[in-house]
Image (spheres, grey):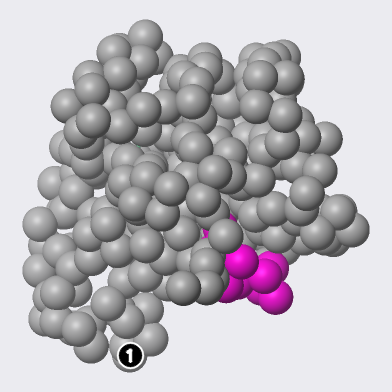
């Protein structure tokens, strides 16, 4: 049978696995199904422990697990150099990382602090630019980069506040990065995932209400899963999407198109 995906044996870097609920873990599971080699990056020691346990529990093997603090240029450079030297060629990167101070997610948007704004931008949007820059020298066969966004980048979603501005930057960064990466046949796209119960969503009081509204309103009348985002990610990382770059695709049961 013809291999349409061409992901077997390809080296894909997955950034942002914190636990089983992480979207990045959904992407990893889908990538394992199609035979990719995975390299994970983590920031917290606690995440490293969890990743190793999750790999063992599921009988998966990672090619590498590497420390990477996306707030630090040196750390990003070191991580990708280490990966590049070990695996040779990087074929894809999954950027599934974001952070905003809890204080800036509470209360009114107008009260967003200068530091909190900068930190959310740095972690959630600038990090993609820095990662693309450091991955590029090792993506010598062309490749694909994906990042995770959310509807709040486009529309006012109550409570998303400082994160919304960071995701708007992230989506614009995807578009601007296409030009520099395109010369080397590297594509970059974003997936705008529907609401999924992850660690990032923990402690959000309105979260159940949001999930309910989606069940009622979305054309598919249900919420989406990490696996569904994972499968769309595989499409974006694979040869099937070779003519697509600079897109934001919604994996949200169609919720975003409803009036
Ligand atoms: C409208 C909503 C609900 C309200 C907004 C949620 C925003 C979440 C995004 C950020 C990334 C969450 C965040 O940084 C939380 C931290 O302040 C505290 N949490 C942590 O430190 C945990 C332990 C670590 C693992 O978190 C991170 N980020 O490292 C949006 C929701 C309907 C959808 C949603 C939840 C979107 C999204 O961007 O994740």
Question: Which span is picked out in magenta?
Answer: 236-245
Q: Which picture quadrant has residue 172?
A: bottom right
From the viewer's perspective, is residue 209 above or below residue 159?
A: below
Magenta stretch: includes residue 166: no
- Residue 126 in view of the camera: no
Which is more toward the observer, 258 or 74? 74
Q: Residue furthest front?
A: 1
Which residue is painted at 49% across and 25% down in the image? 63
What count of labels does the image hold? 1
Where is residue 100 shown, x and y percent of the image? 43, 34
Left or right of 81, for residue 59? left
- Residue 60 in view of the camera: yes
Q: Residue furthest top?
A: 45
Q: Which picture quadrant has residue 189?
A: bottom right
Which is more toward the observer, 28 or 248? 28
Q: Secondary structure at mark 1?
A: loop
Where is residue 226 shown, x and y percent of the image? 27, 54
From the viewer's perspective, is residue 186 above or below residue 19?
A: below
From the viewer's perspective, is residue 58 above or below residue 257?
A: above
Left or right of 82, for residue 93? left
For label 1, the crowd category at 10 Å Cα-Cα, with few meaning under 14, some 14 to 19 and many 20 or more, is few
Which residue is painted at 34% across and 52% down in the image? 33
Which residue is labeled 1 in the image?
A: 259
Where is residue 177 shown, x and y percent of the image? 77, 54
Location of the C terminus by quadrant is bottom left
User: Looking at mark 1, is its residue's CB closer than 8 Å to ligand 1?
Assistant: no
Which is more toward the observer, 120 or 190? 190
């Amino acid at each position: 049978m013809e291999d349409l995906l061409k992901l077997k044996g390809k080296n894909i870097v997955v950034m942002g696995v914190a636990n089983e609920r992480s979207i990045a873990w959904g992407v990893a599971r889908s990538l394992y199904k199609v035979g990719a080699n995975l390299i994970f990056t983590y920031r917290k020691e606690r995440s490293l422990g969890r990743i190793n346990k999750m790999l063992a529990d599921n009988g998966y093997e990672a090619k590498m697990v590497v420390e990477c603090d996306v707030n630090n240029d040196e750390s990003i450079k070191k991580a990708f150099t280490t990966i590049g030297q070990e695996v040779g060629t990087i074929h894809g990167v999954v950027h599934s990382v974001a952070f905003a101070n809890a204080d800036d997610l509470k209360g009114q948007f107008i009260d967003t602090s200068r530091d909190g704004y900068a930190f959310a931008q740095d972690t959630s949007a600038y990090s993609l630019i820095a990662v693309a820059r450091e991955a590029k020298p090792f993506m010598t066969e062309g490749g694909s980069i994906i990042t995770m966004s959310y509807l709040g980048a486009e529309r006012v979603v109550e409570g998303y506040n400082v994160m919304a501005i960071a995701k708007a930057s992230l989506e614009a960064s995807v578009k601007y990065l296409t030009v520099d990466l395109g010369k080397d046949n590297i594509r970059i796209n974003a997936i705008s995932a529907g609401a999924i119960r992850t660690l990032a969503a923990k402690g959000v009081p309105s979260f159940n209400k949001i999930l309910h509204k989606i069940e009622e309103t979305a054309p598919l009348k249900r919420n989406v899963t990490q696996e569904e985002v994972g499968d769309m990610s595989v499409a974006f990382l694979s040869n099937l999407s070779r003519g697509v770059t600079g897109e934001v695709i919604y994996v949200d049961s169609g919720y975003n198109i409803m009036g």
